[in-house]
Image (tube, rainbow, N blue to C red):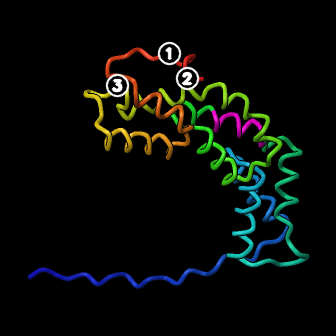
Protein backbone atom coordinates (compact mmCIF):
# COMPACT_ATOMS: atom_id res chain seq x y z
CA UNK A 1 0.00 0.00 0.00
CA UNK A 2 1.41 3.38 -0.94
CA UNK A 3 1.38 6.19 1.44
CA UNK A 4 -0.36 9.28 0.20
CA UNK A 5 1.17 12.60 0.89
CA UNK A 6 -0.79 15.58 1.90
CA UNK A 7 -0.14 18.88 0.22
CA UNK A 8 1.92 21.17 2.35
CA UNK A 9 -0.05 23.90 4.00
CA UNK A 10 0.38 27.14 2.13
CA UNK A 11 2.07 29.81 4.07
CA UNK A 12 0.41 33.12 3.99
CA UNK A 13 2.74 35.69 2.59
CA UNK A 14 3.20 38.80 4.55
CA UNK A 15 2.61 41.82 2.31
CA UNK A 16 5.72 43.85 1.58
CA UNK A 17 6.07 47.03 3.61
CA UNK A 18 4.86 50.31 2.13
CA UNK A 19 7.36 52.25 0.07
CA UNK A 20 9.14 55.40 1.15
CA UNK A 21 11.42 57.77 -0.79
CA UNK A 22 14.56 55.64 -0.28
CA UNK A 23 12.80 52.41 -1.28
CA UNK A 24 11.37 54.09 -4.39
CA UNK A 25 14.86 55.24 -5.33
CA UNK A 26 16.20 51.69 -4.86
CA UNK A 27 13.40 50.28 -7.02
CA UNK A 28 14.20 52.81 -9.74
CA UNK A 29 17.92 52.00 -9.65
CA UNK A 30 17.23 48.28 -9.80
CA UNK A 31 14.87 48.76 -12.75
CA UNK A 32 17.29 50.86 -14.83
CA UNK A 33 20.04 48.41 -13.95
CA UNK A 34 18.07 45.54 -15.46
CA UNK A 35 16.22 47.12 -18.39
CA UNK A 36 16.80 49.66 -21.12
CA UNK A 37 13.95 52.05 -20.49
CA UNK A 38 12.60 55.55 -20.88
CA UNK A 39 11.49 58.17 -18.39
CA UNK A 40 7.86 57.43 -19.14
CA UNK A 41 8.18 53.70 -18.62
CA UNK A 42 10.17 54.11 -15.41
CA UNK A 43 7.60 56.58 -14.04
CA UNK A 44 4.76 54.17 -14.93
CA UNK A 45 6.58 51.29 -13.23
CA UNK A 46 7.15 53.34 -10.08
CA UNK A 47 3.51 54.50 -10.01
CA UNK A 48 2.39 50.89 -10.26
CA UNK A 49 4.67 49.87 -7.40
CA UNK A 50 3.34 52.70 -5.21
CA UNK A 51 -0.24 51.58 -6.01
CA UNK A 52 0.57 47.95 -5.19
CA UNK A 53 2.53 48.48 -2.00
CA UNK A 54 1.25 51.75 -0.66
CA UNK A 55 3.18 54.80 0.43
CA UNK A 56 4.56 55.98 3.73
CA UNK A 57 5.60 59.58 4.28
CA UNK A 58 5.32 62.62 2.06
CA UNK A 59 3.50 62.04 -1.25
CA UNK A 60 5.44 60.10 -3.89
CA UNK A 61 6.61 61.69 -7.12
CA UNK A 62 7.66 58.90 -9.50
CA UNK A 63 8.12 61.38 -12.37
CA UNK A 64 10.72 63.29 -10.36
CA UNK A 65 12.59 60.06 -9.61
CA UNK A 66 12.57 59.20 -13.33
CA UNK A 67 13.84 62.69 -14.18
CA UNK A 68 16.62 62.34 -11.62
CA UNK A 69 17.65 59.01 -13.19
CA UNK A 70 17.83 60.78 -16.56
CA UNK A 71 19.93 63.62 -15.09
CA UNK A 72 22.34 61.05 -13.68
CA UNK A 73 22.64 59.51 -17.14
CA UNK A 74 20.99 56.19 -16.31
CA UNK A 75 18.19 56.87 -18.80
CA UNK A 76 18.54 58.43 -22.24
CA UNK A 77 15.27 58.60 -24.15
CA UNK A 78 16.92 59.62 -27.44
CA UNK A 79 19.44 56.77 -27.32
CA UNK A 80 16.61 54.37 -26.47
CA UNK A 81 14.59 55.69 -29.43
CA UNK A 82 17.54 55.29 -31.80
CA UNK A 83 18.23 51.73 -30.65
CA UNK A 84 14.55 50.78 -30.77
CA UNK A 85 14.10 52.30 -34.25
CA UNK A 86 17.18 50.50 -35.56
CA UNK A 87 16.03 47.15 -34.19
CA UNK A 88 12.49 47.55 -35.51
CA UNK A 89 13.74 48.67 -38.93
CA UNK A 90 16.01 45.65 -39.11
CA UNK A 91 12.97 43.45 -38.42
CA UNK A 92 11.22 45.10 -41.34
CA UNK A 93 8.75 47.30 -39.48
CA UNK A 94 7.70 50.66 -40.86
CA UNK A 95 7.54 54.22 -39.57
CA UNK A 96 3.97 53.99 -38.23
CA UNK A 97 4.75 50.93 -36.12
CA UNK A 98 7.92 52.56 -34.83
CA UNK A 99 6.02 55.74 -33.94
CA UNK A 100 3.47 53.63 -32.07
CA UNK A 101 6.24 51.92 -30.12
CA UNK A 102 7.65 55.34 -29.23
CA UNK A 103 4.28 56.51 -27.92
CA UNK A 104 3.89 53.33 -25.89
CA UNK A 105 7.38 53.77 -24.41
CA UNK A 106 6.62 57.36 -23.43
CA UNK A 107 9.21 58.98 -25.70
CA UNK A 108 8.41 62.66 -26.16
CA UNK A 109 7.95 64.27 -29.58
CA UNK A 110 11.33 66.05 -29.52
CA UNK A 111 13.27 62.79 -29.21
CA UNK A 112 10.98 61.00 -31.69
CA UNK A 113 11.46 63.79 -34.25
CA UNK A 114 15.23 63.61 -33.82
CA UNK A 115 15.16 59.95 -34.89
CA UNK A 116 12.57 60.42 -37.67
CA UNK A 117 15.04 61.23 -40.52
CA UNK A 118 16.90 57.96 -40.00
CA UNK A 119 13.61 56.06 -40.02
CA UNK A 120 12.48 57.75 -43.23
CA UNK A 121 15.85 57.08 -44.87
CA UNK A 122 15.61 53.35 -44.20
CA UNK A 123 11.91 52.95 -45.09
CA UNK A 124 12.61 51.16 -48.38
CA UNK A 125 15.13 48.76 -46.86
CA UNK A 126 12.74 47.99 -43.98
CA UNK A 127 9.86 47.31 -46.37
CA UNK A 128 12.02 45.00 -48.47
CA UNK A 129 13.23 43.20 -45.34
CA UNK A 130 9.62 42.64 -44.29
CA UNK A 131 8.68 41.43 -47.79
CA UNK A 132 11.66 39.04 -47.81
CA UNK A 133 10.74 37.64 -44.40
CA UNK A 134 7.08 37.17 -45.35
CA UNK A 135 7.83 36.01 -48.93
CA UNK A 136 5.98 38.87 -50.55
CA UNK A 137 6.50 40.23 -54.06
CA UNK A 138 9.88 39.26 -55.51
CA UNK A 139 10.41 36.62 -52.81
CA UNK A 140 7.10 34.86 -53.42
CA UNK A 141 7.05 31.51 -55.18
CA UNK A 142 4.23 32.57 -57.51
CA UNK A 143 2.66 35.90 -58.38
CA UNK A 144 -0.26 36.54 -56.03
CA UNK A 145 -3.79 36.76 -57.40
CA UNK A 146 -5.85 39.86 -56.61
CA UNK A 147 -7.06 38.60 -53.21
CA UNK A 148 -3.57 37.39 -52.28
CA UNK A 149 -2.04 40.72 -53.29
CA UNK A 150 -4.57 42.56 -51.14
CA UNK A 151 -3.65 40.37 -48.17
CA UNK A 152 0.04 41.01 -48.75
CA UNK A 153 -0.53 44.76 -48.96
CA UNK A 154 -2.61 44.59 -45.78
CA UNK A 155 0.22 42.75 -44.00
CA UNK A 156 2.68 45.43 -45.07
CA UNK A 157 0.32 48.16 -43.90
CA UNK A 158 -0.05 46.48 -40.50
CA UNK A 159 3.75 46.40 -40.32
CA UNK A 160 3.66 50.19 -40.61
CA UNK A 161 4.70 50.72 -44.24
CA UNK A 162 3.23 53.30 -46.61
CA UNK A 163 0.53 52.10 -49.02
CA UNK A 164 2.36 53.19 -52.18
CA UNK A 165 5.52 51.41 -51.08
CA UNK A 166 3.63 48.21 -50.21
CA UNK A 167 1.77 48.24 -53.51
CA UNK A 168 5.00 48.68 -55.50
CA UNK A 169 6.71 45.78 -53.70
CA UNK A 170 3.75 43.43 -54.03
CA UNK A 171 3.56 44.23 -57.77
CA UNK A 172 7.15 43.06 -58.38
CA UNK A 173 7.33 39.70 -60.15
CA UNK A 174 8.79 36.72 -58.29
CA UNK A 175 12.55 36.49 -58.72
CA UNK A 176 13.07 40.23 -59.39
CA UNK A 177 16.09 41.86 -57.77
CA UNK A 178 14.77 44.98 -56.01
CA UNK A 179 17.13 47.73 -54.90
CA UNK A 180 16.41 49.50 -51.60
CA UNK A 181 17.42 52.84 -53.16
CA UNK A 182 14.52 52.53 -55.63
CA UNK A 183 12.04 52.26 -52.74
CA UNK A 184 13.22 55.16 -50.55
Disc tally is: 3
Q: CA distance from mark 1 to mark 3?
A: 13 Å
Q: Is residue 29 above or below residue 166?
A: below
Q: Is residue 68 above or below residue 159?
A: below
Classify mark 3: helix, strand or loop.
helix
Looking at the image, residue 177 sits to the left or right of residue 81; the answer is left
Q: Which mark is residue 183?
A: 2
Residue at 30% in and 34% down: 144
- Give the quarter of the figure containing the C terminus: top right
Is mark 1 in CB contact (under 8 Å) with mark 2?
yes
Q: Is residue 78 above or below residue 54?
A: above
Task: Answer with the quarter of the image where residue 65 lies.
Answer: bottom right
Q: Position of residue 38 (x, y in %)?
A: 74, 49
Query: Is 80 a magenta residue?
Result: yes
Is mark 3 in CB contact (under 8 Å) with mark 2?
no
Task: Answer with the quarter of the image where residue 7 lies.
Answer: bottom left
Q: Considering depth in this image, is 54 or 70 the residue closer to the camera?
A: 70
Identify the residue position indicated by label 1 in the image: 179
- Give the quarter of the figure containing the N terminus: bottom left
Q: Position of residue 96 (x, y in %)?
A: 61, 44
Identify the residue position indicated by label 3 in the image: 139
Q: Position of residue 100 (x, y in %)?
A: 64, 49
Q: Which is in the foreground here, disc 3 or disc 2?
A: 2
Q: Position of residue 33 (x, y in %)?
A: 70, 46
Looking at the image, residue 13 sits to the left or right of residue 83; the answer is left
Which label's residue is closer to the chain start, 3 or 2? 3
Give the class, few, some or many, for how many residues have Cα within 10 Å of label 2's Cα (few <14, many ≥20). Answer: some
Task: Considering the whole magenta stretch, tell me its main secondary structure.
Answer: helix
Please provide the residue range marked out in magenta: 77-85
Amino acid sequence: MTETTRPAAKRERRPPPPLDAAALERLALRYVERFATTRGRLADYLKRKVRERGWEGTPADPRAVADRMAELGYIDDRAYAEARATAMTRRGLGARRIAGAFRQAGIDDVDAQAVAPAIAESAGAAALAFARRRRIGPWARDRADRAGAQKQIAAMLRAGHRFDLARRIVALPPGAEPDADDFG
